Amino acid sequence: MVSNPVKDLEGGGTWGLQPGQFTDDTSMAICLANSLIACRGFVPYDQLVRYKWWYRHGYMSSTGHCFDIGAATRDSIQEFEKRQKKFAHDNDILLEHIDSVSDLDLLRAFDVNCSKIGVAGNGALMRLAPVPLFFFRRPEMAVEYSGISGQITHGDEKAYDACCYYGALIVAALQGAQKDTLISDTFY
C-alpha cells in the first residue's frame, strides 16, 4: 500500500456510478448497521423494514434509489411486504404504522424468515459485517445473529452457515487472532 497508494476514486462500472457511490450490498449493510444502532440490538423485523425502505424509496442508497438488487433479496422483501399487510390486518394495526411496530412481544409472532427454503446467493454475506462488529464482545451472539441476518432473505442452510462462519472470522480478527489461525482447517 505504501508503494502503490490509492490517490483517487474510480467511477463507472456496470451502473455508471460516480466516484464514491456504492451499490446494493453497501446500502444494505448501512441499513443493517442503522437498525442495530436504532434498536440497540438485533431486531430482524426492523432490518427488513429498512431493506424495504431501501428497495422502495432508496433509503441509504448512494443514488437516492435502488438501482440493483439480487433476486433472493427482492423476493424476500416482497414476501415481507405481503406478510406485513396480513400482520397489520390480523393485529388491527394501520398499514401506515406497520413499519414502526416496536412491541417485541408482538413482533415475536411475525415470521421474519421471508426467503423460500433453499434460496441462496451472496447478498446476505455481503451485508453482514455490521452484526459481528456490533456484537464482537459477545462472540456466540455475533456468530448466531450473523447467520440469522442472512437467513431472513436467503433461506439456504449453506447461506446461513457461511454467514455464521464469516461472522466468526470478523469477531476473531477483531479480537486479535492471527491470519494462520483464521485460515486453519480447525478454525470455527
Image: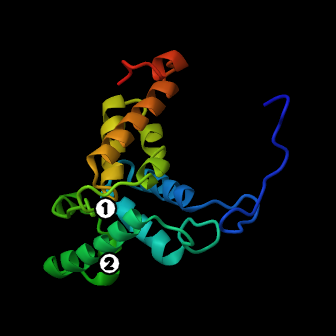
Q: Earlier in the sequence, mark 1 or mark 2?
A: 1
**Residue sitting at 38 percent across and 34 percent down?**
165
Q: Which mark is residue 45?
A: 1
The one of 16 and 90 positioned closer to us in this rendering: 16
Q: Where is residue 158 drawn, in percent x and y? A: 31, 44
Q: Which mark is residue 97?
A: 2
Instruction: Classify mark 1: residues with Cα within 10 Å, few (<14), some (14-19) or many (20+).
Output: many
**Residue sitting at 49 percent across and 19 percent down?**
177
> Dividing the image into 4 quarters, which one contains the C terminus?
top left
Is residue 9 visible in this depiction of the protein? yes
Q: Secondary structure at mark 2?
A: helix
Please identify the quarter of the rendering in which residue 13 is found.
Answer: bottom right
The one of 88 and 166 positioned closer to us in this rendering: 166
Label 1 close to label 2 by CB (< 8 Å): no
Circle 2: residue type: His
Between tags 1 and 2, which lies in front? 1
**Residue sitting at 30 percent across and 52 percent down?**
151
Q: Where is residue 126 drawn, in percent x and y? A: 49, 49
- On screen, 138 above or below 34? above
- On screen, 70 above or below 78? above
Side (left or right) of 42 relative to 132: left
Q: Where is residue 70 drawn, in percent x and y? A: 45, 64
> Dividing the image into 4 quarters, which one contains the N terminus?
top right
Is residue 178 visible in this depiction of the protein? no
Circle 1: residue type: Tyr
Q: Secondary structure at mark 1?
A: helix
Side (left or right) of 37 relative to 45: right
